[in-house]
Amino acid sequence: PRRPLPRRPARARRVLLIEDSVHFQNLVRLLVQRHFPDVQLHVAHDGITGMALYGQIQPDVLLVDILLPDIDGAALITTLRTHEQFARCKLLVVTSLDAAEREAYAFALGGARVIHKPQLVQELPEALGELLGRQAA
């Protein structure tokens, strides 16, 4: 009798964080490891590196800061939205800007969920869980 072919394991979910602050990189890394231990987190410290890494890993979720040193997050998002593969990626924006300061970037954010950095610990696990389609651990 023929044996069934072994099932290939599902590809690990990938999250790309584009954030220049080492403090917030470490905080996001800690939250992802704690709540989503099977998710691969990739980190870019600037927008140019982030765009290159985006093309290489094709993340399930893009987590991006608005204020980056080389290219602002809004321009980065606008650029990535022109790529076909971006249609499969979910977007989550993190920023230290308050709601009034974010107004100037509303066109680029296009309805994406925004987390204010002071609420990151409280809001990221739930928001990321929704985008990944499961509950945080």
Image: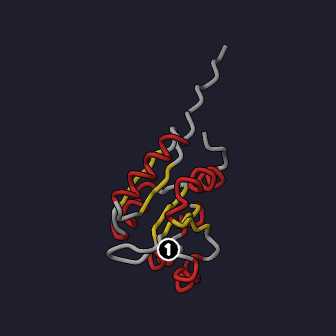
Count of numbered circles on the image: 1
| Residue at left offset 51%, top offset 44% | 39
Can you name the residue that lies furthest to the front here?
Answer: 118
Task: From the viewer's side, name the closer residue of 61 and 45.
Answer: 45
**Quadrant assignment, res 116:** bottom right
Position of the N terminus by quadrant: top right
| Above-or-below relation of 7 to 68 | above
Point out the image quarter for the C terminus.
Answer: top right
Q: Residue at x 43, y 52 (%)?
A: 27
The residue nearer to you, when weighing 62 against 28, is 28
The vertical placement of 133 against 17, above or below, is: above
Please give left or right for residue 126 compared with residue 102 in the image: right
Q: Amino acid at mark 1?
A: Ile
Instruction: Classify residue 126 as left or right of residue 121.
Output: right
Q: Position of residue 25 (x, y in %)?
A: 39, 56
Please name the residue that numbered disc 1 is placed on.
77
Measured as percent of width and height from the top left, residue 60 is found at 55, 55
Q: Position of residue 90 (x, y in %)?
A: 59, 61
